[in-house]
Image (cartoon, helix red, strand yellow):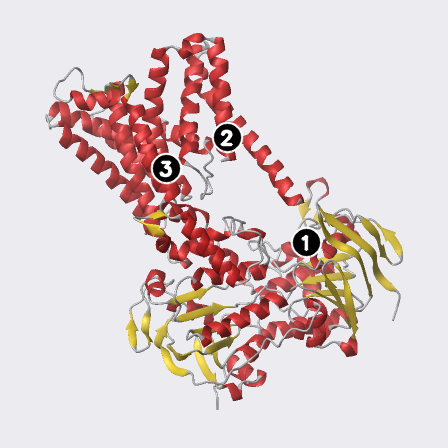
Amino acid sequence: MSAPVLQMRGIEKRFGGVRALRGVDFEIAAGEVVALAGENGAGKSTLMKILGGVHQPDAGEVLVDGQPVKITGVSDATRLGVSFIHQELNVLENLDVAANVYLGREPVKGGFLKLVDSQKMHQDSAVYLKRLGLEIPTNTQLWRLSIAQQQMVEIAKALSLDARILIMDEPTSSLTLTETDRLLALVHELKAQNVAIIYISHRLNEIEQIADRVVVLRDGANAGELGRGEITHDRMVKMMVGRDIESFYQHPEGDRARGYVQIQGLRTLRYPKHEVSFDVGRGEIMGMAGLVGAGRTEVAQTVFGIDGPVQGRITIGGQELRIRSPQDAIRHGIYLIPEDRRLAGLITDIPIRENVTLPSLERYAQAWLIARDRERAAATEVCKKLNVKTPSVEQLVINLSGGNQQKVVLAKWLALEPKLLIFDEPTRGVDVGAKAEIYALMRELAEGGVAILMISSDMEEVLHISDRVAVMHEGVLTGVLERSECTEENIMQLAVGKRAA
Amino acid sequence: MKKELGTFILLVVLCIVVAILNPVFLSATNLQNMARLIGAYGIFSLGLGIVIITGGIDLSVGSVFALLGVVLSIMLTEWMWPAALAVVVIIAIAMALGTIHGLLITKMRIQPFIVTLCGLLFYRGLARFIANDETKGFGSAQGFDWLRSLATGDVLGVPTPFVLLIIISAIMWVVLHRSVYGRYLFAVGRNETASRYSGINSQIIIASAYVILGLLAGISAIIFAFYTNSVSPSSHGNFFELYGIAAAVLGGCSLRGGEGSVIGILIGAALLQVLQNLVNLLGIPSSLNFAVMGAVILLGVIADQLLQRRSAARTARV
């Protein structure tokens, strides 16, 4: 192995009374892919923010090419060849590809007039797109591109900055399976071009696939390291949580009352020409797989009444339901845990209590006046049951970690009596520990007689949590796989539009 | 709570300063007159506050005052309607206009700013047309003294508009800060999407805010009409919506929605009237009236921003 391009030694960082990092060591060589793993709050992002110049370490040193450096801002980081690809994309959707790649450092011509040399800008950015195998014109506006393509544009920007150290923070969280594969292939190519890549992901199977080495952080300290041959899912998890955790995955065999929830001839606004029909058994977790844009979220939203009166027939326990709005769906016991937690699932800048009781507020009210004691008691109880980690239910939701936020969304519905619970990407941005808790809770709810529909782009999750899997492709339900038929290959076949034999 | 405290301190300090510079400030007549105006302005400011809490705005209030004032005068002095009937019809018109605004905003998905800007122009024009561009008044006509006393009368020495404001505030406080409806208003203002996903009918909540504003603006309209006793259709109520918006913002309402309180709006409304009074009492040229108000509001908002940034920095460090 060549000499490390980056070394971080004994990095300490304190925020008020909290020791976020306690002497962390980290190094990476050119052409190496190092995965940085750890639960939320383990210190991964603080460490990376130090590298990006957002935070200054209280102790320890950072060396690039063996030379000690001080990184006090983004410009320092850029100069040293450090580039970030963030989980949330930093692109301007109203500008075209070339403008995004060269944002803030547009090539100029015309002397003091400083006119943007767009010809050069387009020519140069085309080179980077080609290097990434992205075949789109450089004058395409970003909003026309898929999330994956937008991300590629960000990577092109990093390359144009001569990035030698590329930090990818949850790069696949909004990508489909094929897009993920393409990204992982790209990581291989960049590696071959001698770029050092720090890869942060909750998706351990991706880490298994591409990492040369895994550095695990726990509670702000190094928890261990795994070399190429040692990287396995279980070992990583064990290192991350510091103990063996019981397998997430259990499939109690039992008689599921198939056909408890019947959805027939459902038409969505996005694919009005296609009808979707399926059923979910009582006590069953029905997975729903497909590529992004396959129409799964639209199915969930339609059933929940968000898109207006439902076109199609929905019955639960033989009773036909008329759903014209979310209020109707909620009245009939159909609840949705939406894909975008911060936009649709929660009001992040109000207390946990107010979020939890929002759908059931009338239960804590007499003559429309809220009985605060009862409200607080109920919110506290359900948060305790779900193990939401917070000092009090008066805490603002925004201060919680992703996993705890997701539990609050769940808490909103548990105060009511669910019949059909729809989870849309239930564990996106949720750390391993909370993931296990959410899976256990889903199973517990199912055992309690709830029908669960789980939309997920996380193949691992779909394969291991579902009792059956429905697969969609471009608005069409291409097949439903029984437990015994659930393999990655079968699901992918259906997801790309090949009907089950 | 902290937000209101800042504005409250500003109010108290201003009162003390003015009282020291000109003791007339504390005279019974001056206090009564000020309380009367605080009442008249405060009532519709509460309505504007509710609309702002949902993330909306209403620019048409001043023109609505002109329209309703003209119509009220015609009903009472030309058509000789009984006062009670005239009141019912005025309030009904005001609420109907609010309903139309609410429906245009929620069903047609037009921005509140645009809807009510059109209202501002339309109602003003309509008022001038109906009145033939002539000033309408009540003169010394008889038969509706009890109605007139809503604006000009007293209850145990306290001006009636102020008494009305206190009663309405008490009701609004319960509605806003204790009821399910109030909780929904704030939720919709903070995040309409998440509110819809929680089963709140956000369209009804938003539209209802404009109806409540209509009701309160209707009451204020009657008070203003009798307070001035004559309604000049081209100038009556000019800029009044901005007083209401300023009161709400000074009182801690965020134009982004989801924030605000009844107490805050009351303090804001009072502060604006004290400022007006200050201009008169301290011999500041009345042409500077708006300039003083604009400067103080801006300073208040800047101070609030600085305080918030400091407290935010403190929480971030923990």
Q: Amino acid at mark 3?
A: Trp
For the residues labelled 2 and 1, the Cα–Cα distance comes to 48 Å
Q: For marks 3 and 1, give the CA distance.
A: 53 Å
Residue A335 or residue B228, whichever sits in front: A335
The residues bearing labels 2 and 3 have C-alpha atoms spaced at a distance of 17 Å
For disc 1, the chain is: A
Residue, disc 2: B5
Q: Please report whichever mark, 2 or 3, sits nearer to the chain's N-terminal start.
A: 2
- Circles 2 and 3, Cβ within 8 Å, touching? The answer is no
Q: Which residue is mark 3?
A: B173
Amino acid tagged 1? Tyr
Q: Secondary structure at mark 1?
A: loop
Residue A213 located left or right of residue A66: left
How dense is the environment of label 3, judged by Cα within 10 Å: few (below 14), some, or many (20 and up)? some
Q: Quadrant of the C terminus of chain B?
A: top right
Q: Which mark is residue A102?
A: 1
| Residue B101 in the image, given as x and y percentages of width and height | 31, 43
Subunit under mark 2: B
Dot 3 falls on a residue whose secondary structure is helix
Q: Are marks 3 and 1 on the same chain?
A: no
For badge 2, the amino acid type reads Leu
Q: Secondary structure at mark 2?
A: helix
User: Toward the viewer: A61 or B314?
Assistant: B314
Q: Is residue B296 above or below residue A83?
A: above
Horizontally, is B131 left or right of B122 in the view?
A: left
Question: Closer to the camera: disc 3 or disc 1?
Answer: 3
Residue B60, visible in the rendered structure:
no
The residue lying at 49 percent from left, 81 percent from top is A467
Q: Nearer the viewer, residue B197 or A296?
A: B197
Q: Taking A441 as reference, is A246 left or right?
A: right
